[in-house]
Amino acid sequence: MPEIRNMPNLKYLNKINSPQDIKSFDIKTLRELCAELRSVMINTISKTGGHLASNLGVVELTVALHRVFDTPHDQFVWDVGHQCYAHKLLTGRASRFHSLRKDGGLSGFPSPKESEHDSFMVGHSSTSISAANGLAKAKSLLGKGGTVVAIIGDGALTGGLAYEGLSNAGRSKDKLIVVLNDNGMSISRNVGFIARHLAALRARPRYVRAKMMFSNLLSSIPVIGSPVRNGLFYIKTEIKKLIYSRSSFFEEMGFNYIGPLDGHNLEDLIHGLKAAKKLDRPVLLHVATIKGKGCEFAEKNPDIYHGVSNFDTETGDRLPDPETFSSVFSREICKLAAEDERICAITAAMKSGTGLVEFSKRFPKRCFDVGIAEGHAVTFSAGLARNEAIPVFAVYSTFLQRSYDQILNDAAIAGEHIVLAVDRAGVVGEDGETHQGIFDAAFLNTIPNATVYSPSCFEELRINLRQAIYDVSGVAAVRYPRGSEPDGLKYYQPDYKDYTLFRQDGSEILLVTYGRIFANVRKAANILKGMGIPVSVLKLTRIKPIDSECATLAADFQSIYFFEEGIRWGGIGESFGSMLIENGFSGRFKLTAIQDFIPTCSVQTGLRSVGLDTDSIVRLISKDCGSAGMEGPWVRTV
């Protein structure tokens, strides 16, 4: 295997081609391997960006898992998938680790497309137990053998799907182990009952270790050992119910509970995993870890160093963050909340990611972190709205997908006025293919009476947020992209309207778009003008409902091109096309929109791959203008 780029002095990691290579390592060697894994991760992530603190916390756990189990025969399901970096390094991908989150490089999450050692694609939280339940059941049904292990952070246990998985998996007879990585965190600090429950369980490690040793001793006694062990297990369970008024929640769910163990003690982890592996029933192994372990600044600030861009490996110093749509939202929501005590902010364990840290400091009684529970967040918001509060739920586009049912049934049908601040809308770039932001416009477009804004610049974001709060009723959404304002729009602040037509004299071609890629369309229009092809541009800012005047204006043109940074089916472009038909438009209409998942890549590469960069727009229009005539079918999809 080629040496890991820029780190040639690794004593052990450079020699590992597969997890089998660590089977013969003694404990001392495994500890040194753990140090090397941390070093590689810190150095690589400092350059590529990625999830730092969460991965540093599971190094020993990952090594112990691969020491005890044999992937891909045994299967691991990581939850959330951003804990998988050490796993990738041990499963034949160390030489490519420098390509993490880059174009054509390694994904930041598990991907079966990438390796047979990744059994399931995981990017959203709380899914691992359900997936592992299915994997284990299939093994049992088909006689495949092997154990399935779900590794879930306690933060993910704030998501309801995890409990649905526990309820079903606990009743099974399959070889299934749930490893609870209890680091006291999700992305922001963990909240709720389960966090308090786990904290209480951490107080009994000696009891658990002694129980495991005694059980192993009994099992080694010929003939009578196993019956005695089983009898004592029943008696012990009944006594424990008398001693502990709150017996283990997980045992009540049907799991054999082991732990809590020190998640950084390799001997304890290996011992516990071997014990769990021997049991022919679902097991929950509880391990306590430190998020950011081995990196002082990440340990002190695990939420800040959960997901990072470039940083100094010695000091942790990061480049000053540029102004972003998220930071503009952060300041504006604080400004509005200072003026109106009815405004509340809701987050699903993403205060820092969605820009609500400052709001939580200034208005702690009006900021609600509900844990990883997006569906609950929407219904909770609807309840707030019903009693005249003004809830603003700040959420990534990819996670809003999880609350469609609640938006439709708990908010929209009753007409409750909730505001969705939809961050990371559109192509998300390095966040990867499990974090698609291309669906929100289309699925919100299906909600009757909803209002959706898609600002193209910071000033429009400020205006649209105030509009969503005060000027409309029912479900209102403001969707904005990851990162900074597009070049060329930094000082662009027109007199606001829900749409704007930039007309060029003599133009028979109209380009229609919304959001971030308005910048690309506008640049393309200027280039085309220089080529002798005058085109006009219609920018939509309120994309649902589209102002009926837009169809009237568009009817003056012979050819209309709609460019959409979102999924084609059910999207805004299709709605605009329908409006044209209803208004008797008989010219040519072309829709360029996204028709598949975007792989891990930069935003620029992603936009170029679907024809939404400036050069692609220019090529499309100039090619059509150079062809024989501009007539054609009513609609074509690019």
Image (tube, rainbow, N blue to C red):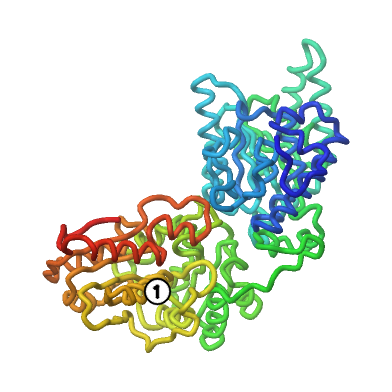
Q: Residue furthest right?
A: 28
Which residue in the structure is indicated by mark 1?
523
User: Foreground: 123 or 374?
Assistant: 123
- In the rendered image, residue 103, in percent from the top left (x then y), is placed at 54, 52
- In the rendered image, residue 166, in percent from the top left (x then y), is placed at 57, 41
| Residue 186, quarter of picture | bottom right
Write the residue at 53% across / 38% down. 112
- Which amino acid, by three-letter code, is at mark 1? Lys
In this rendering, the count of numbered labels is 1
Question: Can residue 92 be seen from the camera position used here?
Answer: yes
Write the residue at 75% across / 51% down. 200
* Residue neighbourhood size for the residue with mark 1, other residues' Cα within 10 Å, grouped as few (<14), some (14–19), many (≥20): some
Q: Quadrant of the N terminus?
A: top right
Q: Is residue 16 left or right of residue 385?
A: right
Write the residue at 23% across / 68% down. 560
Question: SS at mark 1?
Answer: helix
